[in-house]
Image: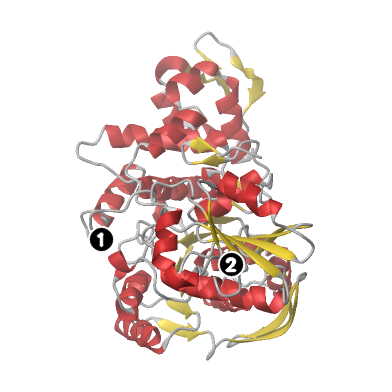
Amino acid sequence: MFPHQQIWGEMVREAGPLVFFGPDGRLGSQKGKAFIGKSIKQDEDPRKRLALICRSSTRVRDEAMFCYGDALSYVNSLINYERKDPCSYDERSFNLERMNHLLSLLGRPHQDLKAIHIAGTKGKGSTAAFVASILTAANLKVGLYTSPHLLTPRERIRIGSSLITPEEFAYFLSRIKSRVEATPYLEPTFFEVYTALAFAYFSYQKVDLAVLETGLGGRLDATNVVLPLVGIITQVSFDHMDKLGHNLASIAREKGGIIKERIDVVSSPQEDTVSSVIEEVCRKKKARLYRVGKEINFELLDASLDGQKFLVETTGRTYPDLFLTLLGEHQVVNAATAIGAVDLLESHGIIIPRKAIVEGLRKVEWAARIQVISKDPLLIVDCAHNGASALALSKCLRELFPGKRIILVLAILQDKDVKEIGRALFPLSETVILTKADSPRSMEPEEIETLLGDLCSGKTVITKNAREAVKYSLRLTNRESLICFAGSSYLAGEVLALMNKSAKLSVEKVERGDKTCPRV
C-alpha cells in the first residue's frame, strides 16, 4: 500500500465502496473514473491532497463529508459557553474526562504535539501570536489555536499565516461528528469540539510545534489535556469572577492549573498575590519558573504610531534591537514573555536564532489590539473587555493621542466588570456611544448606562446595534477627533466587518458563528 493510501484509508472506508485507489496510486470511483485524472502523490502537500479529494468528487463530498456550511451548522448546534453562561463552573460543565474520551475516539492526536500552552487574563492571545510568529520565522511549521474569533471561525486554527481551509474544516468536523454520534451519552461542547478539531488538524499536518491558548481559566479548560514543553501565564486580573473566583488568588489557582510536573513556566509581571500562587504551584509541581521583571527583563526605548522599539534580556541572551508594530507598553510585556518562552525551547533541542525573534516580532499581526484601522478619520479597534485591559487601552490613548477628542463606542458582555471598564475609559472620552454587540450575552446599553451612573454625566448616546453606532460615531468626527471601539471581541469583529476591514485574513465572507456579518 502506498503511504498516501494509508493516510486517506480512513476517509475511503467511511465513504464505503464509492472510492478506491488504483494500482498506479490514483484515487478513482467504482466506475473507474480517476479524480480529474490527477494522482495524489506521496510527497504532495497535505493541504493539496485534501483539497483535491474534497473538490474532485461531488459524491464523496456529499456522502462522506460535510460542506462548510453544514460543518458550521453542526458546531453551532453544540452547547456554547462563549455565547451562553454555564449553570456552574465545575466538572459537570467543564469535563476533562469527556474531552479525553473524545480525543481517544480520534486516536489521541494531542499526544503527537509538542506544545506551548498559554493561560492568563490579559494578553494571552497576543502572546500566543508572538510565539507563533517567532517560531514561524525560524522556518518551523507552527500551529496556532486561539479564541474567540473576530471574523471567521477558521481564524481560531491556523498554521503559519494560513487559516484552516473550509474543506479541511468540514472534513475534520465530519470525522468528529460521526464518532460523537456513534458514542452514547457523549455530548461535547462547542469549545471541546473546536479544540479536538485543532488537535486533529495539527497532528495530521505534522506541525513542529503547536501554540495553544486556553479558552477559560486553565485547570478545567479543554486544552489542558496536553503535556507542554513550556507553560505561560500572562497577566492575571479580575475577569469571569462568577466562575473563577472573586479574589486574585482563586483566579490564579485556576490559571495555574495548566502547570504540569517538571515543565518550564514563564510568567508575565503579576500582582504579589498572583505571584505567590504561581510560585507555590511551581514548587509543588517541581516546575522551573522564569518571571518577567526578574529572570527576564525588558526596556521600552521608543513608542510612536508606527510601533515600539525595545530590548529584552533573558537568562541566556540579550535582544537590543526589537521592534513591534502593535501599540501599547503592555504588548512589550507580552513580547518579553514570548521571548522568554521561546528561549526555553533550547533545553528541548529547539534553538531559535536571534534573527527569527527579531523578524518574528517585526512581522507579527494581531487584529483588534489597539488597531488603527483608519487614519482619516482616526479609528481604533480594541478587544479590551475587562478592567485591566481597559486601563491598558486608556494609558495608550493618553500617551499616543494627547489632545484628541475621544469618541468611545462601547459594548460589554453581561459577566464583565462594567464599572471598572467605565472608570478606565469614560474620563478621557468626550462622547460615549453605548451599543449592543451581536451576542446573546451582550448587555443592553441602557443597563450599562444605569450601572455607570454619574460617570455618564450627559455624555452618553444609546444605539441599538454596532451598525447604528458606527454610523452615528462617523457623523461626529473631525480632524481633532478619534473614535475608539472597545468592550468586547464581538463588537470588534462587527466593526472590522462593517468598516470593510478583513483584518489581514483575506476572507470572502465575514462569518460570526452561524451568521454572516453585514457590511456598511
Q: Secondary structure beneath disc 2?
A: helix
In the rendered structure, the answer to whether residue 45 lies left or right of residue 170 reads right
Residue at point 32% right, 44% down? 79
How far is disc 2 from disc 1 in space, using C-alphas?
30 Å
In this view, the residue farthest toward the top is 31
Q: Earlier in the sequence, mark 2 or mark 1?
A: 1
Q: In which quarter of the image is the C terminus?
A: top right
Camera sees residue 131: yes
Label 1 neighbour load within 10 Å: few <14, some 14-19, many 20+:
some
**Residue picked out by circle 1:** 89
Q: Is residue 451 above or below residue 182?
A: below
**Residue picked out by circle 2:** 131
Q: Locate residue 155, reporting x and y percent.
A: 56, 48
Camera sees residue 230: no
Q: Quadrant of residue 326?
A: bottom right
Q: Locate residue 376, reporting x and y percent.
A: 79, 57
Mark 2 or 1: in front is 1
Residue at point 55% right, 77% down? 337
Dot 2 amino acid type: Val
Compare residues 331 and 425 and report the one nearer the observer: 425
Number of numbered discs visible in the structure rendering = 2
Q: In this view, does 397 lie above or below 61?
A: below
Q: Locate residue 387, reporting x and y percent.
A: 46, 72
Q: Secondary structure beneath disc 1?
A: loop
Dot 1 amino acid type: Tyr
In this view, the residue farthest toward the front is 458
Q: Locate residue 293, reporting x and y percent.
A: 54, 89
Q: In which quarter of the image is residue 324?
A: bottom right
